[in-house]
Amino acid sequence: MKKVLFIAMACLAAVACNKVSKMADLADQVKVECNPEVLEVVADNIDADVTVTFPAKYFHKKAILEIVPVMKFQGGEVAGEPFVYQGEKVTDNFKTVGKDGASITEHVNFKYVKGMEKSELVGRATVKYKKKSWAFPEDIKIADGANTTYMLACSTGSYAAAADNYQEIIPEEVEAQILYLINSANVRSNQLTSESIKEYKTGIQDVMNDSRRTITGTDIIAYASPDGPSKRNNTLSDERAASAEKAFGKVSKKLETGGVSTRSIGEDWEGFQELVNNSNIEDKDLILRVLSMYSDPDVREREIKNMSSVYGTLAKDVLPELRRARFVTNVEFQNYTAEELKALVEDNIDVLDEEALLRSATLTDDAAAKIAIYKQAIKKYDSDRAKLNTACILLDQGKNDQAEAMLSKVNDRSIEGLNNLRGVLALRDGKKEKAADFFAKESGKSGKANLGTLDILNGDYAAAVKKLAGTGDANEALAYILNGDLAKASALLKDKDCEKAAYMRAIIAARQGKAAAANAELAKIKKCKELKERAENDIEFAKIK
C-alpha cells in the first residue's frame, strides 16, 4: 500500500513539474516593454522602467519566476537586481501573479561602463519549482542602448585670460582758468598774465612740439559761485562765457587749440562740493550733508548761510574760486603701437608698464613667449592678472598641477577669474561639487558657462540651456540638442566648421530622419579618430546606416 502511495505522489509531482516547465516553453507569451525604448546614459547612469506582462492562465500557482536584467555590450555584460515573481500558492515574499495574469513595472539602474554605448538590455528568465529549475530558451530582448550624446560635452572648462587696461590713445588735458570779481563778468588784465595762463601756453607749446600728441579741441566753460539769486547767477555765468571767449582769443594767438566750444554752467555746486570736501573747514561734513539733502539751489544757499559760524570762511576761501572760466584743451596721446610693443619686448622690455606688458602678451601666439612676458609682469609688478593668464596657458597645455601652483601665488583672492580657474581645476579632477562652489562665486561669463556644463554632466539639461544660452560656449548647442530644441542647436552650429560641430549636425539630421544629410556631415569627420570611432557605435545613427 505504501509503495502504491509513493508511486502516486511521484506521478503527481511529475505532472506538476511538467506544468511548471511549460512556463519556460511558453516564454513568448510573456510581454516585456521598456521606457525609454532606447536606453540613455544620464550622469553616468542608465535608468529605465521595465514592464513585464503575464497573460491569464500562464503563471503556475506554485512556481517562482526569476528574470535577471542584463546589459550586454562589447567587452562584457553586467547583471542587475533580479525581478522575482511567485504563483498565488507560494508563501515567499515575492510579487504575486495570479491566474488572471498581471502587468508589473520594475525599475532598473546600471552604472555606465565603457562599451555600453553599443549594447542591449535583455532578461534572463528561470522558472523554479521546489529544487528544480527551467531556463527560458533564450534571452528576452528588452531594449537597445545606450545613448551617450551628453558625453560630447567639453568638460575641460571654459576660461579666458584677464583683460589688460592698455590704452592705445590716452586722453590728456591742458588747462588754465581766469577768475572774476563778485557780480562781474569783466576779464581783468592780470588774469591774462597769471601763472595759470603762462603754464597753459607752455603746455600747449609742448604738445605742439610732440609728435605723439594731437590737439582735438578746446572747451571754454564759465561758472558763477552759488551765492545770491540763482537767476542772476545763471545770467552772470552766460556773460562770463562771452567775455572768456574773447579773452581766449588773445591768450591763444600763435597756439594750436583746435575747434573751440563755449558753454555756461551756471552755479558751480559741483566745484563748491569739491573745494569743501578738500578743505579743513571744521563743519565741512555738515555742509556736505546739506548739499545731499536739498537739490533746490536757493534752498541750499539759504541753509548754508544759516551756518553763520562757517559762512564767513566759505565767502573768503571757497566762493571766490568758483567765479571763474576754464580753458580746457583736449589732447590725445598716441601710446606705443602694436609693432612698437613687439620691438620693445625684444629690445627694451624694462620700459613697459604692467598694462603694456599684458597687452604685449596678446600680440603673439607663441605660448612660451607669452609666459616670458607674463613672467616679467610678475617680477616687476607682482601682477595677479599675469599669474591668472599664465595659469590659463598651463591649462591649455594640460599642466593642471603647474596651473594650480601659479594660482596659489595670486595675492588678491577676490580678483575676477580666480574662482573660475579654481573651479576648472576641480572639474578636471572630477570634483563636481567643489567645482560648482567655485563657479557660483564667479560673476563672469565663463563661470556661468561652466555651471551649465556641470548641469549637462549632472543630467539637468533644462537648467543647462538657461545657463549656457547666449554664452557662445561650445556646450551651448549640445545643451539645446539634449533638451530637444534642434532648431536652436542648428542655428548655433550652422557656420561652425570644426569636426565636432559636424558631428552634432549629423545627430540633429539623424533625429530628424534625414539620413543623407546626416551621412554628409559624418563624411566631414576625417581627422578626428575619436569621433570616427564613436560614430561606428553611436546609437544616434542606428537608423541611418
Image: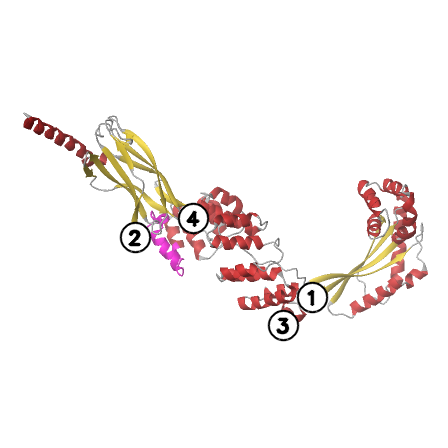
Q: Who comes first in sequence, dot 1 or dot 4? A: 4
Estimate the spatial distance between the alpha carbons at disc 2 and disc 1, rounded to whole Å. Answer: 64 Å
Residue 379 image offset from top left, x and y in percent: 62, 67
Location of mark 2 (residue): 75
Please, which residue is most extreme toward the bottom here?
347
Find out whether the residues at labels 1 and 4 contact each other: C-beta distance under 8 Å: no
Q: Who comes first in sequence, dot 1 or dot 3? A: 1
Location of mark 3 (residue): 343
Estimate the spatial distance between the alpha carbons at disc 4 and disc 2, rounded to whole Å. Answer: 22 Å
Residue at 82% x, 46% y is 285
Q: Who comes first in sequence, dot 3 or dot 2? A: 2
Q: Who comes first in sequence, dot 3 or dot 4? A: 4
State the SS at label 3. helix
Find out whether the residues at labels 2 and 1 contact each other: C-beta distance under 8 Å: no
Estimate the spatial distance between the alpha carbons at disc 3 and disc 4, rounded to whole Å. Answer: 47 Å
Give the amino acid at mark 1. Asn
Task: Report if residue 541 lies within the magenta region.
Answer: yes
Please report the bounds of the magenta region as a residue range: 522-545
Tell me if residue 157 can be seen. no
